[in-house]
Amino acid sequence: MTEIRTYWQNFIGGKWVDGARGRRIAVENPATAEPIAEIARAEVEDVDRAVAAARRSFEAGALTGLRPAERAALMFRIAAELERLTEEVALAECLDNGKRLSDARAQAPEAARYFTYYGGLADKLEGRMIPLGDGYVDYTIPAPYGVSAQVVPWNYPISLAARSLSCALATGNSVVIKSPELSPLSVCLLAEACERAGVPDGAVNVICGYGSDAGAALVAHPGVDHIVFTGSVATGRAILHAAAERIVPCVMELGGKSAGIVYPDADLDRAVASTAVGIYSNAGQICSAASRLLVHRSIHDEVVDRLVAQAKGLRIGPGIEDSDLTPLISARQLDRVEGYCLAGAQAGAVAATGGRRVPDRPGHFMQPTIFTGVTPDMTIAREEIFGPVLCVLPFDEPDEAIAIANGTDYGLVAGVYTRDLTLAHRTAERLVAGQVFVNEWFAGGVETPFGGTKRSGYGREKGQEALLNYVQTKNVAIRLTGAA
Ligand code: NAD
């Protein structure tokens, strides 16, 4: 299983098409830095076509005209088609994103799970009857926005695309997805699953282009009614400016600098293993990565020793070999991550292990890195590095730990390790984050609401709450007339 299609197209109006200007984007394997495929490059004309197709589909009631239970059935068919594409998706995610094979094999089932979960809710989205007294009937309708533009980042392309698309379809919106230019291939397979499942033409469109032209044109397009963006704060801000021009509602899923707090009574085996999963999965390129660990001073050195031993045991290599630590997405990302590490060392932090790229090998491999001697004001403790780099900070009192955890511009997730349930509850209450994990980083799933506070964004994806971002409440107030 190492052969991959070498040319991929955009999916617009139910057809597979080249870019309007015939240009292509080269897609690279981050484990080798060699090109593996090309994808049709969408530009402004393609954005126009995709939005027009989505608009036609919405106006024609292609999804809203289906009974909710039929929409659910359509979504279950998409899920089944995704399951069938598990190996193709795994290969695409291994080769264009660098994902570890076992994680890559989980991508299509995870994407499918979004469609079964939200498919199951498609016929349960109910309005309310509001009592206005004799002579009136009043009710609410959860109405779709229309055309939803969804801009997807490169770190979890099919899973994040499915996360937003499934909510949009469950609620009857038509969609244009802008897939990430660095790792777009699995999102084409999502479009393929939609096509095979019989999604009406134009209800789902997938285009791949650069953020600065196709992405910017999409979010500023007059035919777009709703935007879901997952990506960096800087791009989120630019998109919000474009959205503000036309008062378009947005869901913003942005970055993080999330902290786990290890209290002295914690199960240290669990805390260390969980932190390792939290910071080395996908080479640390996860918005909710466990990038800071706040450890009670009494156990600080022991925890650091265990973390270092764990890091030194990691097998670094290509995702296709199911390595523990896979490459970063690009040479640029590797420079960025290494740059943060060099700046951290210059500021006085100490690399207990790692701190540099893996020398003398092709591809974009970064060493697993653990910094001690980090103070909360250091750049490496405040900014999202988006690599396998963990900052460990000591604390003495819970108040201090909570203040450090809350002391960045971000607020996506946080973690607590303790056997004391009261302390866990009290800490979780005071952590400013959209989700708090207790004793297991990444606990939760498709069912649990996820999203940011502060610069990590707003709106929620996952869980039943997510659907509320994809509908607008319409109220119908009726004065009954005529004979009683
Ligand atoms: P990015 O912001 O550089 O790009 C994300 C997407 O936006 C890409 O598809 C890109 O082409 C597009 N884009 C870029 N400029 C644009 C513009 N002006 N208008 C419209 N679209 C534009 O982010 P990235 O580097 O791909 O992803 C990493 C970031 O994503 C990290 O900050 C990470 O924390 C965040 N992220 C957040 C979540 C979440 O759910 N909160 C999940 C995954 C990643």
Image: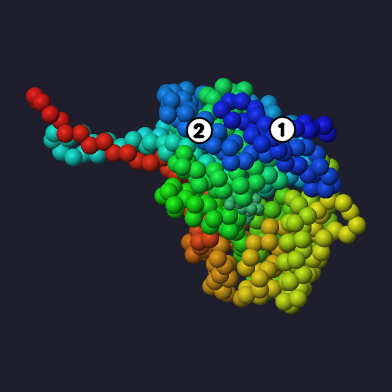
Q: Is residue 104 above or below residue 1?
A: below
- Is 159 displayed left or right of 370 in the figure? left
Q: Label 1 CB, ligand 1: below 8 Å?
A: no
**Residue 77 x, y percent position in the rendering:** 58, 24
Nearer the observer, 406 or 221 = 221
Nearer the observer, 86 or 427 = 86
Res 142 → quadrant: top left
Q: Which residue is mark 2?
A: 52
Residue at 83 percent across and 51 percent down: it is 363
Quadrant of the frame with the N terminus: top right
Nearer the observer, 307 or 41 = 41
* Other-residue count near label 1 (Cα within 10 Å), few / some / many at <14 / 14–19 / ≥20: many
The label on residue 8 is 1
Q: Is residue 98 above or below residue 331?
A: above
- Is 55 displayed left or right of 206 in the figure? left
Disc 2 from disc 1: Cα separation:
22 Å
Q: Nearer the viewer, mark 2 or mark 1?
A: 2
**Residue 413 x, y percent position in the rendering:** 57, 57
Mark 1 falls on what kind of element? Answer: strand
**Residue 467 x, y percent position in the rendering:** 46, 40
Amino acid carrying label 2: it is Ala
Amino acid carrying label 1: it is Trp
Task: Say which label, 2 or 1, has the lower sequence index.
Answer: 1
Quadrant of the frame with the C terminus: top left
Nearer the observer, 188 or 424 = 188
**Residue 430 x, y percent position in the rendering:** 49, 65
